[in-house]
Amino acid sequence: MTRPTKTDLSRRELVALLGAAALGPHVGPGRRAPVRSPGVGFRVRTITAGTTLGDPRDHAPVDAALAFLARARRSFADAGYEVQTVRVATQPLVAGLGPRERAAALPALQALDRTVTGANALLSIGPVPGADAAADPAEFAQWVTELLRTTRNLSCSVTVASPDGGVASGAAGAAAQAMLAIAHGTAGGIGNFRFAAAANVPAGTPFFPVAYHGGPDAFAIGLESPPLVAEACRAPHTLAEAKARLTSLFEARLGAIGELATGLAEREQRRYLGIDASPAPGKDASIGAAIEALTGLPFGSAGTLAGCAAITDVLKRLRVRTCGYSGLMLPVLEDPVLARRAAEGRYSVRELLLYSSVCGTGLDVIPLAGDIPAERVAALIGDVAALAVKLAKPLSARLFPMPGHAVGDVAHFDDPFLTDCVVLRLE
């Protein structure tokens, strides 16, 4: 009997495959299990499948992508890797839709969310073009808040800069209004975990909420690998020695992942885009601790910028197929060491923006005061967009205005994968 393909799966076969995928640790919709594969030194944070839908009601490509992800997850597990999440990214699904059309699409998008949630997967519907959002920022903010309030595993973004168009006029303001509306319209503002302003982010990036798809069906890999960075920096070293060890370690470990993914692509006849080599952190896999192992100093001290630049330089020069950001991630609310240094007052949002000039992702899960004016949020997003255009690199801003919180207050999260953190000052 031949293996079912994406075009000839019956509903019964699809349900069986999705059930097999769900046999892994289930810790809530789209969440990742806090267990590392022994001897590997990292987790596969995501296998992200890209596909194109005819319209938001077209579930067949999503069903086929979920079936592929079930087989992919099994292949990686058989090879000894823990796969935390599987994800589906579509083309910019609501691009070009006006306010009425976006509102009419809500039921179909909610149905897509139920489909992927039932398969313990995540879904990104891609970016809303900046011009679409800026045409009526208040309406867009209301729409995206309702979308995130009524879905569980769906993410989206708004494009604030692109390689061909530069910084999009009015898009930063629209994104800022949306973030503030989401902060007040979802419990504890948690909806902002699934929304971002994206600048120069290419199709095929596996990390959410900025992921989107273009072209034939494809897939990409994202990792949680700060322990590899720390391993390379543990012994006494010069910066050059640490970079050489990190290069050797990453190329060996990522090369093995790449070989597995290439074989999977050949069997599945689905394009393999590469690995986003960004060492995405977690509560038990701190990139802050890894940077401190490299510099010998607390994060935020003089020397942090040089350490961030050194790690990013390695990631950009790896001799493996890479995609997406492939740079350093500094998500404050996901990293206990970064959160601790913020509480010690060692850095502000302005320093994080400075580090973005040599890192890979921009401003990620940053807690801000709940009463911050929309103009200041827009200015901050505009700075990220300007950096992305000037440096020709992908950056994004995922900001958390915290209702009822002032700068210096501790923001608490009822979420096992977010750490409590003080609300950061901008400067």
Image: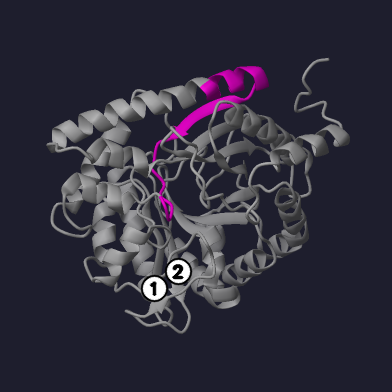
Question: Would residue 192 be found to the left or right of residue 329 on screen?
Answer: right
Question: Would residue 336 be found to the left or right of residue 48 on screen?
Answer: left
The magenta span reads 260-284
The foreground one among 44 and 156 is 44
Query: Helix, strand, or loop for circle 1?
Result: strand
Residue 258 coordinates in the image, percent (x, y): 48, 24
Q: Which label belongs to residue 274?
A: none
In the picture, the quarter occupied by the N terminus is top right
Q: CA distance from mark 2 to mark 1?
A: 6 Å
Task: Please determine whether, in this image, residue 262 is positioned above or below residue 117.
Answer: above
- Residue type at mark 1? Leu
Asked whether residue 90 is in view, the answer is no
For label 2, the residue is 400
Residue 374 coordinates in the image, percent (x, y): 42, 76
The foreground one among 349 and 236 is 236
Q: In the displayed orientation, state which residue is furthest to the top.
A: 1
Task: Please determine whether, in this image, residue 106 is positioned above or below residue 360.
Answer: below
Question: Would residue 33 be found to the left or right of residue 169 on screen?
Answer: right
Q: Are marks 2 and 1 in contact (CB under 8 Å)?
A: yes
In the picture, the quarter occupied by the C terminus is bottom left
Query: Helix, strand, or loop for circle 2?
Result: strand
Q: Residue at x 14, y 52 (%)?
A: 303
Residue 284 coordinates in the image, percent (x, y): 42, 52
Q: Give whichever of discs 2 and 1 has the lower sequence position.
A: 1
Label 1: few (<14), some (14–19) or many (≥20) C-alpha neighbours in 10 Å = many
For label 1, the residue is 368
- Residue type at mark 2? Phe
Label 2: few (<14), some (14–19) or many (≥20) C-alpha neighbours in 10 Å = many
Q: Is residue 175 magenta?
A: no
Quarter of the view holding residue 255: top left
